[in-house]
Image (cartoon, rainbow, N blue to C red):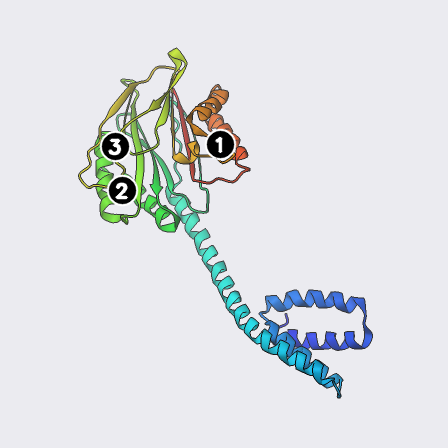
């Protein structure tokens, strides 16, 4: 493997051969050498210096104007070379940063990736995809001692790695709650205090938390400023907003949350999501809730997993397979 100086020596040899032989093959080899010199950090001013050295050795009486032009080129390339070295340094640092972000993204995924439970009373499907390497979305299912099933979905209002890392805090705060898992208002109030104490004021978190009780067939839920989901009532074939009011987590330490409840009948369906779903862009416009309901209807006869995957594919395709926001979509069919 040639080093920095060896590349310059090779350049001088190839330049000498080309001046004396003028062969096309030497030009082609020179093009390949240029790529190798870039990889080895050979700067433009070093190449010009090598070029001047070869010319001065081969030609004793070089025209003074040519000599002056080469000297001028050398001065120009000296400044260019300094910028080039700085660029290479920044490029290497960027590669290192990209590697560190990839590792952080893998760690975050391992920490936050939810497990979709198997239960006798519901068919559940989930799609959760980040728009970039790290996600600001989070979901989690929580099995209660009495056979109940809790479901949380959250979205942080903020960008970058700090915002994504905040979701790890929410996950561990959820895990640290008492095993008896009190109602949704208490859960959100507890999390709100954690967020208010630990998250930068420029960021806050929206969250929905609901608990299904199979004994009474009730779904109790509360919201902290989160995008409303949908409730599908099979008896009248109708979709309604799963509306619940509440202040986002982290805005005020004394916020209290209201509990809402729905009776769940066979054939009913609960859809939970983040705003990355309804704000998927089609021709510079958001897909919106009505069009989303149309997509859900198109695939609602399928098992829950296939339903969410089909809807995700349709929305991803409409955006030329480029997500503009983190995407989390949950379907629970009863």
User: Callout 2 environment at 10 Å: few (<14), some (14 to 19), or many (20+)?
Assistant: some
> What residue appears at the point 25 percent right and 42 percent down from the top-left corner?
250
Q: In which quarter of the image is residue 173?
A: top left
Q: Residue at x 17, y 39 (%)?
A: 254
Image disc number at residue 173: 2
Mark positioned earlier in the residue sequence (1 or 3): 3
- Residue denoted by label 1: 312
Residue tagged by mark 3? 246
Quadrant containing the C terminus is: top left
Residue depicted at x 64% and y 66%? 36
Q: How crowded is mark 1: few (under 14 residues within 10 Å), some or many (20 or more)?
A: many
Of callouts 1 and 2, which one flags the residue occurring earlier in the amino acid sequence?
2
Which of the two residues, 88 or 147, is positioned nearer the viewer here?
A: 88
44 vs 205, nearest the viewer: 44
Which residue is found at the position 81% from the left and 72% from the top?
22
SS under mark 2: helix
């Amino acid at each position: 493997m040639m080093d920095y100086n060896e590349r310059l020596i090779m350049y001088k040899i190839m330049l000498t051969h080309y001046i004396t032989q003028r062969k096309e093959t030497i030009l082609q080899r020179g093009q390949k050498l240029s790529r190798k010199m870039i990889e080895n950090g050979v700067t433009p001013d070093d190449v010009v210096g090598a070029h001047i050295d070869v010319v001065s050795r081969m030609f004793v009486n070089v025209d003074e104007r040519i000599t002056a032009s080469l000297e001028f080129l050398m001065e120009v390339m000296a400044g260019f070379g300094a910028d080039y070295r700085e660029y290479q340094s920044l490029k290497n640092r960027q590669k290192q940063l990209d590697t560190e972000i990839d590792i952080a993204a893998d760690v975050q995924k391992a920490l936050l990736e939810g497990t979709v439970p198997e239960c006798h009373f519901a068919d559940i499907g989930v799609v959760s995809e980040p728009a970039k390497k790290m996600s600001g979305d989070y979901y989690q299912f929580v099995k209660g001692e009495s056979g109940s099933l809790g479901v949380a979905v959250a979205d942080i209002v903020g960008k970058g790695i700090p915002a994504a890392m905040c979701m790890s805090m929410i996950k561990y705060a959820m895990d640290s709650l008492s095993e008896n898992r009190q109602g949704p208002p208490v859960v959100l109030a507890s999390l709100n205090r954690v967020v208010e104490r630990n998250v930068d004021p420029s960021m806050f978190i929206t969250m929905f938390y609901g608990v299904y009780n199979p004994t009474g067939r009730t779904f109790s839920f509360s919201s902290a400023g989160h995008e409303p989901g949908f409730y599908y009532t099979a008896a009248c074939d109708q979709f309604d907003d799963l509306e619940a009011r509440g202040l986002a987590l982290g805005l005020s330490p004394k916020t209290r949350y209201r509990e809402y409840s729905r009776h769940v009948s066979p054939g009913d369906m609960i859809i939970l999501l983040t705003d990355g779903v309804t704000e998927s862009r089609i021709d510079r416009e958001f897909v919106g809730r009505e069009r989303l309901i149309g997509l859900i209807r198109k695939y609602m006869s399928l098992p829950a997993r296939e339903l969410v995957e089909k809807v995700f594919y349709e929305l991803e395709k409409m955006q030329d397979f480029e997500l503009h926001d983190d995407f989390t979509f949950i379907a629970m069919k009863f």
